[in-house]
Image: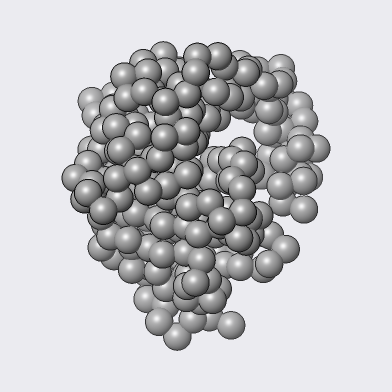
Amino acid sequence: MFPDNMLPDEELTDLCISQQWKVLQKTQGFRFSIDAVLLAHFIQPSARHRVLDLGTGSGVIPHLIAARHPQVSIDAMELQPDIADMARRSVAYNQLQEQIQIIEQDITQMPSQYQQQYDWVTSNPPFFPVGTGKQNPNPQIALARHEIACTLDQLIQSAAYCLKSRGHFALIHRAERLTDILNCCMKYKLAPYRLRMVHPTLEQPANLLLLEAIKDGRNGITVMPPLPIYRSIAKITSDKSTYSDEVLTYYR
């Protein structure tokens, strides 16, 4: 069944989880990828923790977190009014209004009401600085891929601002940005705690990373075993059966 308020330029996408939830996405806009799935399975919130997702887009990460952690409350911030509205309608479609709140907000201008309010802050941010790589002519895709509205430094500063002391920040990003990420974390008193490199296959170099940092935490980082997305180079296709055993468990 399609929602009554779905717009002509939107489509309903199955999240492939046991709850059978679906989210709205723009047919010609930025579309979520496995990055969101990896991040949602990386974090470890406790019951009754408050979670904030920065730059939530279509609200995929809050939905995936809610599926795994039904006792946490989740706020999700999105800059673009039409995308925030779309995410809000997805939350209503899945009847998650009591657990997920979509907030239209520029995260570079965080109001004081969000200061030190959250146990976890998550983000799947734009990967590329402005001026690097080809910028997509679609404004929504460009905002999702390039640091047009929010730089990496601004993102991490906002995460630190919203976290309680000893709160957790988790993000997924390009492996090549590791040095930049660690420098920004230390600048805003977020101590790197867990790092997991993500590889297309174990035969290839990492292209993504998952990082957890703790506000006001002590120095010392655990480098976790690598996470391969696919079984082998020869089997990389769009067929989910070629995913690694661990990634297949994410999709059940």
Residue furthest out toward the front: 165
Q: Residue at x 40, y 40 (%)?
A: 164
Q: How many marks?
A: 0
- Note whether residue 74 is visible: yes
Q: Is residue 168 placed above or below 186 in the rendered structure?
A: below
Q: Is residue 218 placed above or below 95 in the rendered structure?
A: above
Q: Residue at x 77, y 53 (%)?
A: 252
Q: Which residue is drawn at 48% across and 28% down?
A: 213
Residue 206 x/y as whole percent: 59, 20
Residue 149 x/y as whole percent: 22, 41
Q: From the viewer's perspective, tell me whether residue 28 is left or right of residue 251.
A: left
On the rendered image, what quadrant is the N terminus found in? bottom right
Q: Which residue is drawn at 54% across and 76% down?
A: 95
Residue 81 x/y as whole percent: 25, 63
Quadrant of residue 245 within the rendered picture: top right
Residue 229 x/y as whole percent: 68, 33
Q: From the viewer's perspective, tell me whether residue 240 is left or right of residue 101.
A: right
Q: From the viewer's perspective, tell me whether residue 56 is left or right of residue 155.
A: right
Q: Is residue 102 placed above or below 133 in the rendered structure?
A: below
